[in-house]
Amino acid sequence: MRSAARSALVYGALALVGLSAGLAGCTPESRNTLPEKDRIAPDERLIGRWHATVDGADYVAEVTRADALTLNVALVETLPVGKRPVTRTGYRAGVYTVGSRTILAAQDVEPTPGNWRFAVMLFSGDDRVTLMFMDEHYVFMEVNRAAFPGTIRTNDPMFPDVVITASSTDLEAFIRSASEGRMFTVPFGPFERQP
């Protein structure tokens, strides 16, 4: 399997924000989200029903507004017959600005509250968005060399599993310090708006 296709398969399991990092695959998790001072109202283009097909799996995300600053995301993942049953995941999400980046932060809320995952949103007009999730390899290297607070749950450089333990303020500084194109490199999507 090609590297890009393999990455899409591994990261396609994300439900996020993200959304998959959506959100269940190989992107780092964080115990904290970004600082409240960085939070902004979500882009209205996010509201609605979205669909993406990644490596044969179908993802449908229903994004609704919980309040002025919070989104509810219901993500359904359907794999081809015989592969795996339908998976439903719920997320609470917020949008933040850190430097020039607009970041979607999503937290699992169903079946139980979990950690946060982060993605930069790349819109193509109003009806198409790709989520670029935080790269676990990049974070793994920074945590491994003790340059950033985190816990390495799986010490395999090919398939690391990292939980960021930094404070919200330190997380913001870490994201701000990374050059464009280094930290948010894991694509999920594109998602296209559905009627």
Image (cartoon, grey):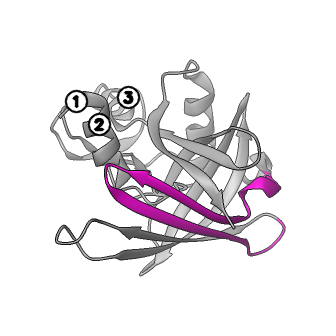
What percent of the width, then of the height, locates residue 40? 81, 51
Q: Residues within 10 Å of mark 3 (few under 14, many from 20)?
A: some
Mark 1 residue type: Arg
Q: Nearer the viewer, residue 44 or 125?
A: 125
- Asked whether 42 falls inside the magenta stretch, the response is yes
Look at the numbered discs 1 and 3 and tell me whether their residues touch, using CB distance below 8 Å: no
What percent of the width, then of the height, locates residue 30? 46, 52
Question: For the residues marked 2 and 1, what is the alpha-carbon distance in whole angstroms?
Answer: 5 Å
- Asked whether 141 falls inside the magenta stretch, the response is no
Q: Identify the element where label 3 is drawn.
A: helix
Mark 2 residue type: Ala
Q: Is residue 67 visible?
A: yes
Which numbered circle lies on residue 2? 1
Q: Nearer the viewer, residue 54 or 37?
A: 54
Q: Quadrant of the N terminus?
A: top left
In the picture provided, is 154 more to the left or to the right than 186? left
Q: Nearer the viewer, residue 152 or 137?
A: 137
* Magenta-highlighted residues: 40-68
Mark 2 or 3: in front is 2
Residue of label 3: 138
Q: Tell me which numbered mark, 2 or 3, is placed earlier along the sequence.
A: 2
In the picture provided, is 74 more to the left or to the right than 30? right
Question: For the residues marked 1 and 3, what is the alpha-carbon distance in whole angstroms?
Answer: 20 Å
Q: Quadrant of residue 180?
A: top right
Mark 3 residue type: Tyr
Residue of label 2: 5
What percent of the width, then of the height, locates residue 67? 80, 73
Look at the numbered discs 2 and 1 and tell me whether their residues touch, using CB distance below 8 Å: yes
Q: Is residue 151 visible?
A: no
